[in-house]
Image: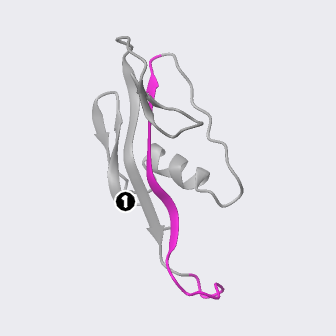
Amino acid sequence: MIVRDATTGEEVDKGGAADVVLRAMRISKTYPARHRRASGGPVVAVDRVGFEVASGGSLGLVGESGSGKSTVARIVAGLVRPDTGEVVVDGRLRTAGRREGR
């Protein structure tokens, strides 16, 4: 299993043959500019995020307000389609449903 070291950010092979039930690979999401923002530029909510969760494992998303936690959760749940990357659940590619953008 490949995990990202929280201190260095490097990917580390932890070995083992644990079944991966959830894999997010380099997911990114950018939203159009909000009219209230002074810069007027697009908002990068998530930038090349990746992780794996083994069978029986768990994952915690921790970060500052506005760091993209909810966007990652929505992408993993299939509510929002990432701009780039992909999410695989139990070996099946997850795609966003028709309600995206509501």
Q: Nearer the viewer, residue 42 or 88?
A: 42
Q: Neighbour class for label 1 at 10 Å: few (<14), some, many (≥20)?
A: few
Q: Nearer the viewer, residue 21 or 5?
A: 5
- Where is residue 62 drawn, in percent x and y? 66, 43
Whether residue 5 appears in this view of the structure is: yes
Residue at 60% over, 50% down? 69
Please name the amino acid that badge 1 sits on. Answer: Arg
Magenta-highlighted residues? 34-55
Q: Nearer the viewer, residue 7 or 27?
A: 7
- Where is residue 57 drawn, in percent x and y? 53, 20
- Point out the residue furthest to the front here: 8
Indicate left or right for 64 with 98 as reference.
right
For residue 62: magenta?
Answer: no
For residue 53: magenta?
Answer: yes
Relative height, residue 43 to residue 65 (above, below): below
- Where is residue 60 drawn, in percent x and y? 62, 34
- Where is residue 16 drawn, in percent x and y? 38, 11
Task: Determine whether the residue tagged by mark 1 lies in a helix, strand or loop.
Answer: loop
Quadrant of the frame with the N terminus: top left
Whether residue 100 appears in this view of the structure is: no
Relative height, residue 47 to residue 7 (above, below): below
Tag 1 residue: 98
